[in-house]
Image (spheres, rainbow, N blue to C red):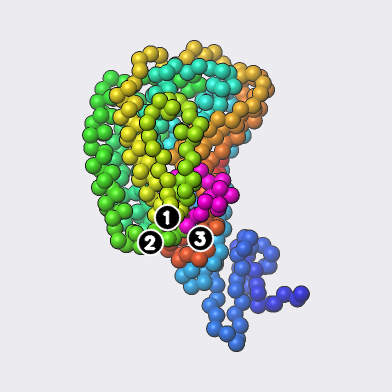
Amino acid sequence: MTPDPRDTVLDHGLLAEGTFEPGEAPAGIRRAPTGIDQLATEHLIVNVGPQHPSTHGVLRIVAELDGEEIVNAEAAVGYLHRGIEKLGEHRRYHQLATLMDRGDYVSGIHGELAAALAVERLMEIEVPRKAQWLRCLMSELNRIASHMVWYGTFGLDIGAMGQFLYAMRDREAILDILEEVTGQRMMFNYVRPGGVLEDLPAGTEEKIRAFLRTIDGYLDEHDALLGGNEIFLKRVRGVGTIDRETALSFGLTGANLRASGVPYDVRRDQPYAAYDELEFDVPVGATGDAHDRYLVRMEEMRQAVRMIRQCVDGMPEGEVMAKVPKVLRPPAGEIYACVESSRGELGVHLVSDGSDTPERFHYRGPSLFAMQVLEEIMPGTLFADGMMLIGSVDVVLGEIDR
């Protein structure tokens, strides 16, 4: 079949004649032909990013538009690559946490914990009970701080400015606590194989309790500011729906999966640290649209507050670090360990050859799967809603370009 000369595949760059070379465009991106006997709209190819504020990092979206409607979209990554996995093969086991901090850099505690769990299971290290509780406490504090970033920027994607400032206020209160405990605001390096760096400093417990006295009311205010806004609801209800089958086929986890009706949470279904001793509920959505993803994450923050209270009230006494060798040399073998990070199942696959560095180090970032589903849900939506959908799945480019 002879191709229609008017049916031209677009390339990333224009030629001198103003046409595009066929066969070099992203998959699925095609310029619609314009016929003389029909009313048609010429499709427009728009590059969003990699420095566009709506992409939440250096993510590039190549979108094909028919007027204001997205016909096709493709995510292009690779602008933030830093080689975490390859670097991990040349670092000692106790140094992996510093690399994980720079993956999902908004919730580094979870990455550190996944790496520590993998090493501990390889070496059969028994972690002190108090360290397990401290891991849960810090994880849930970090989860709220991360969700505050998502909540604030999600509102910005739709045009709401005020609630972003309130979200940053509450996040600062948490970061003050995290900084007091770990010495850092983002790159914590707090969770180590065998336990944690140190116990809570004097006065930190009171700061956490002061935060707990106000956060419930603030969360209700946040929900009212954004979730009670009529414009917001019209923008998110019924938009970007991910059904159960699609969510499972794309490998989604975390809030994106639970919003589609799948009640899977690593903390409950594959307990680690002290989560089997804590009481919490797993929020699940009904339709899987952007509104459900919003509701699930808002409830996750409330459940995190509930667990923080239990950790503070029930914190056991004892050591915070097991006795481990200064240089870790796990026996030859392999292991996979995962945690429920702010974005879903964050896993670490380690292969040991018996030396003091991993033979293979793989980092399973949930954001990669969330980004891939964007190509499925963005077509058919308005261009402005497409930008909102990026925020609704809550990706962090650090664990995509790893």
> Relative to 12, is 100 on the left or the right?
left
Residue that sits furthest to the bottom in the current view: 37
**Disc marking residue 378:** 3
- Closest to the camera, between mark 1 and mark 3, is 1
Q: Which quadrant of the figure contains the C terminus?
A: top right
- Check disc 3: other Cα within 10 Å, few if <14, some if 14-19, many if 20+: many
Is residue 339 shown above or below 151? above
**Disc marking residue 290:** 1
Q: CA distance from mark 1 to mark 3?
A: 12 Å
- Check disc 1: other Cα within 10 Å, few if <14, some if 14-19, many if 20+: many
Q: Considering the numbered disc 3 on the image, is that residue within a helix, a strand or a loop?
A: loop
Q: CA distance from mark 2 to mark 3?
A: 14 Å
> Is 386 covered by the magenta stretch?
no
Q: Which residues are magenta?
A: 241-255
Q: Identify which amino acid the numbered label 1 is placed on.
A: Ala
Is residue 72 shown above or below 366? below
Q: Residue 264 or 321: which is nearer the viewer?
A: 264
Q: Residue 95 or 278: which is nearer the viewer?
A: 278
Q: Residue at left 41%, top 32%?
A: 139
- Give the tally of numbered discs: 3
Q: Which quadrant of the figure contains the N terminus?
A: bottom right
User: Mark 1 or mark 3, which has the lower sequence index?
Assistant: 1
> Is 243 covered by the magenta stretch?
yes
* Quarter holding residue 9: bottom right
- Give the percent coordinates (x, y) of residue 213: 23, 34
Q: CA distance from mark 1 to mark 2?
A: 9 Å
- Give the percent coordinates (x, y) of residue 377: 51, 58
Q: Which residue is mark 2?
A: 235
- Give the percent coordinates (x, y) of residue 234: 36, 62
